Image (spheres, coloured by chain):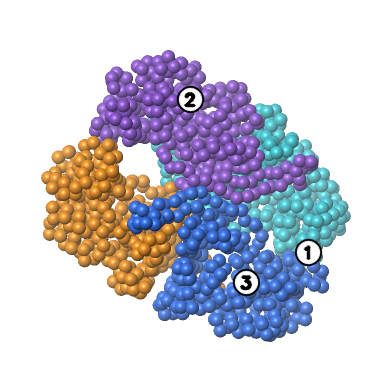
Chain colours: A purple, B cyan, C blue, D orange
């Protein structure tokens, strides 16, 4: 793309995730990194050094008022997503908000509505729906490779990074919830959640979610900031095959197990069951960086009006589940229907 | 021990687990395997062949009426534990019952009482409390190596073996519940359980339990007969160290992670937290077969009156938790206090 | 089979491996374990206890002179194989000799000739050629799944067990040599070997072998009694696929990697090469105990005259390679042609 | 450092490794990336884009003639190292040459001499001697943690990257040879090498090296461009402990095994040996990027005259071993003394 037609982007928030957005927008052929801002000036030093052409500022308004900036990407603390995204949309900018889109359905809906009115692209940064293994599993599900789905069990645990403003559900669960919604293509019927805090007051660090989907599909999530070994693992159990997606694996991220339990129809009881075990298959995955694909989707939406996979409506669905989980949590694990 | 003083044993139930009891009683220097019985004669063929000196019968009464038989070990279906154990105790035999001791607190209590009256040894076969890694962790907890315990997360999943008469909670959870009770030395304050069935009617195949113990310790269990990869894993998180016990590992079954989160007392928020990561240590474990140790404990109790680790009272505590879990399950996951 | 037609067997040598032979002969429907002998009486105690029907003796002659004994299995030290096998054959017994068949080609040939004259079955205990993963790889090679074979790299290392009478080449390499000969169906053209000792005088504990086969196939073996982690791993590289057979894996012992280097024919140099990586496939393997299959093959040969896979001629081929390796070792790693 | 005192650097060769040098020189507080050059203009596109302040050229002379450029880093094909390094030194530039320093001892010596005469820093890019796990092992060896060293077994295999101009020994072995020399602090007494090619003519793709060091230490290297699974593994066996360094591990790169064989002094034979197995320990490693440390060492040498760890003399020692290996290879694996 010529410099003229490249999308000029401002990135707000240069903490843990922001630099990845900055690198990708700087490298992408269809975008120019114009502004990077963060309230903490020390975070701008290395960016200024590595991207001399990029304006580094502690003032978010500079991004909004900059005439050339068409799009703003937000990697700021979760609690600021709504406020900053709203201001960016009001300034007529296209917006990519890091997950979760907002901290309540009400806020998320307001952003969706505002984006519609301002004819701006609004996207939620659910990067995993762009990751090759997650897309491969989506393909396999579409082909009914696993048969009828029984359960999905997600584990996303590691040591830290404690968030200052949201609990572990709002920090880690958005990933798994977005993957589950993307795979199943529908929202859950009900949600239950339990979580506890051990180190700090008031902000839960370990949580378990249980989601029920139509078709009797049962989905469990375990999220934690307090674990010795990093886990990024999902186990899918279907009527004809089983699958493990382990994102910590370097090579075999997805493994399909050709096994299951065959129930002898005319009779009951264990002795009529056959445990079928077969080959294990690990499909080759393409190795593109998910964030690069997400950003391409964002830039394409801006230039062509195409609907991004992780659009605001999708982001809203994820927030709906998280809000229900939070409500369940506050009512001591009661089942919350959606 | 001389033949005269060796404990003569009958083993009932020669399905999956029984042959292990038979082999251990046959090999143990302090016991003689006298009788093996199973309702299914085909299960006796290989036993008869391998232990020509052992009487093989389909009639449980033969074991009870045999004058030399001092002790009976039960590896029969769970639903038969109470009935058969009661008959054996009434016949004045010492009894080792496979886990769980019974299917209700009422039954378990009745057995405990009956054993007391008949002055017979009654033991529940919670083999894991005799396993070297479980004992090593117990030692470490006694030494406060992990500091204050926050959470324990148990996973015990694999493909099958569907039980004909009990759900996955009663089949698999007794192991993890017995380990948790042994490690913590006290019963939980409350229990919650969820479980579902997918292949057969009425008997749950996948379950999640949540136990709260005094001291704010939170214990989770995931048990399943529907999983592609066998997991036997427990993660313990403490205030000063973390630990993983993975029983599927050949060598490093126990790993101690010298890591944690240090909270800067005078302030709040993530930026005051330090994530400490240090060395990882895997202690050497002795390699004795747990079942051999369990049987030694049983035989010692018979000959010396010593109290076994997995005595009937311990088996009763486990049943108490399982019964509470079953009640929670039947009340759609409500919290059940003990 | 009726007791009348079952092969009555004596097992000599009850150290590390003998008890496995004893268990398998005792359990096999077509054989009866009649005698177990070992020069060390303490080794017979547990056998006498577990197999009351079996005569336990320290006198090998009892086995030879026993009128009912048709077959003798030898699990004695390597240096005794030739002498004891010869005596057993001279006594008209069928003989299964643990690997290696003998410590020299001359001895091995003499045994083959003697067995022929006495019309006795003589088998070498190369158990691996009966193991399901090794047989699966043989199948795949027959189907040319890997294309043209380039290299095979074997690692068989662990801590101990130091042999008293032979070096690590004669102790561990027979396994890998037998696997390579079985897979390739032909002897190597040449052999080179290096080995050293560190703990004891005169008996090498760590060794490397290099074998060249027709077709330009290059095979390497690493054997060691001095390694922290047990390895049982073979990597096969072919022109169209690659394969790893790891016998320490519980489930995925064989993995086929659909990858390779494609050479652009019309030109040379790296920039014309394509590195093809594809799916990874782990075929299901049958789980029969290899030793049980080996023993069935032995008993079948005795009763039907069928040729066993691991017959004496095969055992002789393995000894031929080992003797060449020993010669290479003694000539400081010179290439020895066969 | 102020811009005035920062070392201005030119990087030549922007293929596989060059961009890492570029990124590190660009990010390092003590250096400025001034010029990047590569004969292939297409390789300069993304660099020009990411580092607008850096001059990108296809003409190496621009780097040499540039008045501000004090140092040149070479990541060009191995066969060009000598010629380009010589020209850079003659132009009075400090030089960092990617490993190996040159393709012959004669060339390497000439560069060492030239650097001495021109009073320029000359460094060989043996990055591994800067890597935290390699340094940790060096520390442990210094503390005699493993006791007397018996063997080191290196595996460095993966699929590709076939080099156009040098065989696998010259491409991969420099890493392991540099690690071995760094750990042992002395050159080997003798070298043997075998290697073969399967895909291309004339350039070996799979190789095995055997090095003997004083003290009876035996070091083996396996290097290959034709392997299904990437291995970066070294096993060290010592008289009192054993160690595994696996660079493909994310967390436990170094593991110390407290085990070994204890030889009962007064007698001989296996039954007097004890196999001691103990705890396994994985020390925490610092996570600095090795290349950043290497570059700091280079810049420090330029500014302070301090001797870098991977100086030209060290690079020469590595070339000496490689040349000996090449000679051994050409004399069909004969032992070559150094």
Rendered-image quadrant of the N terminus of chain A: top left
Report helix, strand or loop for mark 1: helix
Q: Residue at x 13, y 55 (%)?
A: D90
Work out whether residue B148 or residue D155 is closer to the camera in this orientation and state it: D155
- In the picture, residue B79 is in which quadrant? top right
Q: Position of residue B109 (x, y in %)?
A: 76, 40
Is C281 placed left or right of D92 in the picture?
right
Q: What chain does mark 2 sit on? A: A
Does residue A100 show up?
no
Instruction: Kindly identify which chain the residue marked by label 3 belongs to.
Output: C
Where does the image place residue C328, in percent across and percent down from the top left?
44, 77
Which disc, if any, is residue A315? 2
Q: Marks 2 and 3, how far apart in space?
A: 64 Å
Q: Determine which residue is flagged by label 1.
A: B49
Image quadrant holding the C terminus of chain A, namely: top right
From the viewer's perspective, is residue C51 above or below residue D131?
A: below
Q: Which mark is residue C164?
A: none
- Left or right side of B337 for A204: left
* Image point (21%, 39%), residue name: D54
Foreground label between 2 and 3: 3
- Above or below residue B277? Residue C70 is below
Distance in Å between CA atoms under marks 2 and 1: 66 Å
Q: Residue at x 58, y 42 (%)?
A: A243
In the rendered structure, the answer to whether residue D264 lies left or right of residue A240 reads left
Residue matched to label 3: C310
């Amino acid at each position: 793309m010529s410099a003229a037609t490249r999308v000029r982007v401002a990135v707000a928030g240069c903490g843990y995730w922001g630099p990845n957005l900055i690198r990708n927008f700087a490298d992408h052929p269809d975008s120019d990194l114009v502004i990077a801002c963060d309230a903490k000036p020390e975070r701008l030093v290395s960016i200024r050094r590595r991207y001399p052409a990029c304006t580094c500022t502690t003032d978010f308004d500079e991004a909004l008022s900059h005439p050339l900036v068409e799009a703003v990407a937000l990697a700021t603390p979760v609690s600021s997503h709504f406020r900053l995204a709203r201001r960016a949309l009001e300034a007529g900018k296209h917006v990519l908000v890091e997950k979760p889109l907002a901290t309540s359905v009400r806020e998320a809906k307001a952003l969706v509505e505002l984006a519609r009115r301002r004819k701006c692209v609004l996207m939620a940064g659910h990067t995993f729906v762009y990751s090759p293994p997650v897309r491969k599993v989506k393909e396999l599900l579409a082909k009914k490779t696993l048969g009828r789905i029984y359960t999905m069990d997600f584990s996303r645990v590691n040591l830290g990074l404690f968030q200052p403003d949201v609990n572990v559900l709002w920090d880690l669960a958005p990933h798994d919830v977005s993957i589950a919604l993307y795979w199943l293509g529908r929202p859950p019927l009900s949600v239950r959640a339990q979580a506890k805090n051990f180190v700090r007051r008031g902000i839960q660090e370990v949580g378990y979610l249980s989601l029920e989907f139509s078709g009797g599909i049962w989905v469990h999530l375990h999220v934690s900031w307090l674990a010795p070994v990093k886990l990024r693992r999902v186990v899918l159990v279907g009527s004809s095959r089983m699958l493990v997606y382990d994102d910590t694996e370097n090579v075999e991220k997805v493994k399909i197990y050709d096994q299951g339990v065959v129930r002898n129809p005319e009779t009951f009881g264990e002795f009529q069951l056959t445990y079928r075990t077969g080959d294990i298959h690990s499909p080759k995955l393409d190795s593109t960086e998910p964030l690069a694909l997400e950003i391409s989707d964002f830039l394409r939406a801006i230039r062509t009006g195409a609907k991004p996979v992780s659009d605001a409506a999708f982001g809203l669905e994820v927030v709906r589940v998280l809000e229900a989980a939070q409500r369940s949590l506050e009512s001591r694990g009661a089942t919350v229907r959606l």
